Amino acid sequence: MQAGIVAVAVSGIVTGNLTWVPAALVSFFITMIPSLLRRDLHLVLPIELNFWIVLALFLHVVGGFSGLYDRVPGWDHVTHIMSASLVAVLGFVVVVTVDKYVDSIYLPRNFLALFIVLFTMSFGVIWEFLEFANDQLLGTHLQYSLQDTMVDLLFDAFGGSAIAFAGSYYLTNTTPEHFVEKLGADAAKEKIKVMVARRRWRV
Amino acid sequence: MEKGVRRMFGSTKGAWSPRRIIEAELSWVASLVLFFLSIYFAIRGDVLWTAYGITVLSLYVLPMMSKRSPFAALPWDMMVILVVPAVIHVAVGSAWLKGGPTWMDDIASLSFSLSMATIGMLLSVEIQMYTDVRMNSPFAVFFIVMFTLAVSGFWQIGIFIGDELYGTDNQGSNYDVMVSLSWSLVGGMLMAFVYYAYLKAMPEDRRRMLGFVHLWEVGRSKNG
């Protein structure tokens, strides 16, 4: 699928259809981030998450490039629910890590679920802001209608709630500490410390 | 002389200092206004605003119940912020504002977002009072902004569903909705930092008088 994203960029350049080239290049770079994190920091994201990132970006880029957004009726909803759940999972990872490393913050499971729903929803609203701003400033037509915007938000809410449930269910089986350990965050923290120290040494 | 002045302005001794009574009375009056408005909304079948009233009133009653003191009422300035959008909602529905000034919508959205931020703030305080959750101030500021945006999003979905069900047109165009959501971003960010400063600047004795609002700022550790 990463190859597919690159293919979109290349064919876009070749055919002179440049609208989706920047998006494809940025997406490709984003799909590289997990492996970069792994190589440099030994931070291991779960493989499912990795796959989810690539799939969401792939559907978005390919759908935009080949006009599937306009032709396939549910495409917009599928990508929205994908990106919303992705945001929810990333929010989950970050919040659980914060919970572990900041002493004055303690977030039990149920509150975590609430937090994930709110986080995803607010991100969905910000996403609609960006579409709206793009429409107003560049004269594009990303927001088709009120109905469309509302259903987008509704699907964001679904995606967020699903991940919130899944996340709090997941934490019944493991503790946040264990989860963060599996990410290799401790080692990553050490690595970052070493890198910062080395940078300081040089200067 | 000095003693008399101190008694007039915010002494903490006893429940009956005049200032404390006046503040509590203001707060009670505001809550009563909201109570009757909620009944009015419920009779009219206005689901969203009835839910709003119930949420605010339960947040209002909770500290009073658990402290068993009517003086553990929420600060009156917060209550005013919470009552204003409901009053505006009634006023907008009335005949004499039909075709009124266009900026009325902006005022309504802004006051709604201010009240949402206030609810987020109260929620973050009361969750810490009654559960194991602990936050520190930066996290709470983030929580308030996020809460305001997210609930405004859910609120718009609620209005949309209501419009679809009853064939009304309360929502206006996509443009109206986006402007209203933008106001909630502005209001949320504004209020989050206002509350941050408000709790920092609140004098010690007033904070003790309110009894519970200090929690938010302290950010106790997991064991404490």
Image (cartoon, coloured by chain):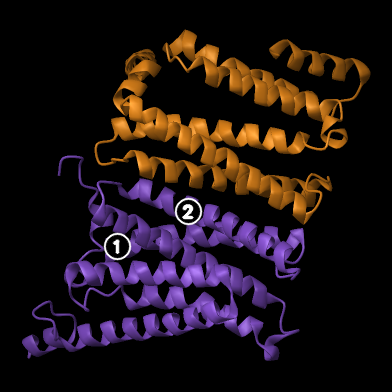
Chain colours: A orange, B purple
Residue A109 left/right relative to B219:
right
Considering only vertical position in the picture, is A80 above or below B49?
Answer: above
Classed neighbour count for the residue bearing mark 2: other residues with Cα under 10 Å, few (<14), some (14–19), many (≥20): many
Return the chain for callout 2.
Answer: B
Give residue B193's quadrant in the image.
bottom left
Give residue B152's quadrant in the image.
bottom right
Reading the image, the residue beneath label 2 is B147
x 58%, y 55%: residue: B154
x 30%, y 26%: residue: A175
The percent coordinates of residue B115 (x first, y second) are 47, 68
Instruction: Say how many tags the image has.
Output: 2
Classed neighbour count for the residue bearing mark 1: other residues with Cα under 10 Å, few (<14), some (14–19), many (≥20): some
- C-alpha distance separating marks 2 and 1: 19 Å
Please tell me whether mark 1 sits on a helix, a strand or a loop.
helix
Return the chain for callout 1.
Answer: B
Q: Nearer the viewer, residue B89 or A73?
A: A73
Which kind of residue does numbered mark 2 sit on?
Phe
Q: Is residue A35 visible?
A: yes
Considering only vertical position in the picture, is B124 above or below A102?
Answer: below
x 65%, y 48%: residue: A153
Q: Are marks 2 and 1 on the same chain?
A: yes
The quarter of the rendered structure image containing the C terminus of chain B is top left
Please tell me whether mark 2 sits on a helix, a strand or a loop.
helix
Q: Nearer the viewer, residue A5 or A14?
A: A5
The quarter of the rendered structure image containing the N terminus of chain B is bottom left
Q: Is residue A94 visible?
A: no
The percent coordinates of residue B162 (x first, y second) are 67, 65
The percent coordinates of residue B72 (x first, y second) are 23, 73
Q: Which mark is residue B199?
A: 1
Which kind of residue does numbered mark 1 sit on?
Leu
Observer-side mark, 2 or 1, equals 2
